[in-house]
Amino acid sequence: MGLRAFLRFTAGRLVAFVVLAVGVTLISFVVTNLVPGDPVAAALPDLALDDPEIVAAYREKYGLDQPLPVQYLVYLGNVVRGDLGTSIIGGQPVATLLGQYVPATLELAILAVILSAIAGVAFGTLAAFFRDRLPDQVLRVFSLVGVSMPVFWLALVAFYFLSFRLGIFPGIGRLTPGTPMPPRVTGMVTVDSLLAGDVATFQDGLGHLLLPALVLAAYTVSLLTRFTRSAVLEVLNEDFVRTARAKGLSGVAIVARHVLRAALAPIITVAGVLFGSILSGTVLVETIFSWPGIGQYAFRSATNLDLPSIMGVSLFVAVVYITINFIVDVLYSVIDPRVRLR
C-alpha cells in the first residue's frame, strides 16, 4: 500500500511537471511575440535579410508564416526536439551554446550548494541547541549580515582582497592561462580532470572554483542557517525528543537519530529552491570572475539583444526550477510519508 501510494504521488507530480513545462513554453512564446519588431529581422544577419529565399525558408522552418496557434505548435515541436533557435551572435544553435555554458555553472552551483548545506545545517543546529546563548547570538548576527550583503559587492571585495591583494586564491577564469583543458566528458573541469587522472589540472581548477563558490554560498549559508534553526527548534519541542532525553540519550544521538530527520523536510525544500536560485542567478558573480557559465552567456545575450538566446536561457532557468521542485516533492514524500496522503 505504501509503494502504491508513493507511485501514485510521484505520477501526479510528474503530470504537474509536464503541465508546468508546457506552460513555460507558452509563456516564452507569448513574450517573444509581444516584443516589438520582426523576429526574422532579430534572428537573421543583414546579408541574409536581403535574400528573400533565406527569409522565406526561415519563416517556413519556424512556422512564422502560419497563424499564431500553429506557430506555437511548431515552436513547441522544435523545443521538444531540442531546437531553441539560432543565436544572433555567431549564428550557432542556442541549444549547442547552452550545452557549452551550462556545465561551468552547474559545477559552480553544485559546490556552492554542498558548502551551503554542510555549513548551514551545522550552524542552524548549533544555534538551536544554544538558543539565546552566545553561539546562537553570534550565528544569528552572522546570518543577518550574510543575507544583507549584496552578492556582487561581496564578490568584488573577495576578489580584490583574497585574490588580487593576498593571492590566496588564483585569478579569474576556470584555469590558469596556459593550462590545457582536460578531455571533455561532462564539461566540468574538476570532474573531467579526475576522470583523466590529471591531478594538477584538478587542483588548479578547484582553486579557481572555490572563491566564486564561497561567494555564492555566503548568502545561501545564511538563509539555511536561519531556516535550520527554526526547523530544529520546532522539533526540539516535540514529545519524542523529551522522551529521548529522559532515556539518557546524548545530544549528538538525539540530533542524529531524531531531530535532523524530523527537521529535514523543510530544510530540503529550502535547499532545493536555493540550488535553483544559484544555478540561474550567477550573472554578476560569473561576470566578475570571468566564469564562462550560463550567467555570463545571459549577460552577453541581453546586452546584444540576442532574442533567441535570451528566450533559450529563460526556458532553461524555468525548466531547472520545475525539475528541482519535482525532485524536492518526491524527496519530501520519502522523508515524510504523510505527504503522499494529502
Image (cartoon, helix red, strand yellow):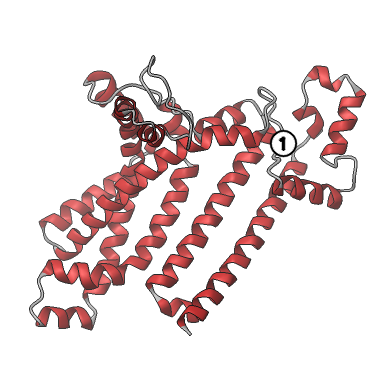
Number of marks: 1
Residue at image x 27%, y 52%?
118
* Left or right side of 121 for 14: right
Asked where in the image residue 148 lies, by quadrant, the reply is top left
Residue drawn at (31%, 34%) of the image:
210
Q: Residues within 10 Å of mark 1 (few under 14, many from 20)?
A: many
In screen coordinates, is 335 left or right of 307? Answer: left
Look at the image and tell me whether residue 342 can be seen: no
- Residue 115 horizontal/vertical position (percent): 30, 46
Residue 34 vs 21, above or below: the answer is: above
Q: Secondary structure at mark 1?
A: loop
**Which picture quadrant has residue 32?**
top right
Residue 263 visible here: yes
Q: Position of residue 34 (x, y in %)?
A: 76, 43
Q: Residue furthest top?
A: 178
Instruction: Give amino acid for label 1.
Output: Gly
Judging by the rendered image, the residue that carries numbered circle 1 is 85
- Judge whether 234 appears above or below 96 on screen: below
Residue 78 x/y as whole percent: 75, 45
Q: Position of residue 47 (x, y in %)?
A: 82, 17
Q: Quadrant of residue 108?
A: top left
Apparent side of residue 325 relative to residue 245 in the rendered image (left or right): right
* Whether residue 47 is situated above or below residue 233 in the rendered picture: above
Query: Residue at point 12% right, 78% down?
Result: 245
Taking depth in this image into account, of 107 and 263 the one nearest to the observer is 107
- The foreground one among 75 and 11 is 11
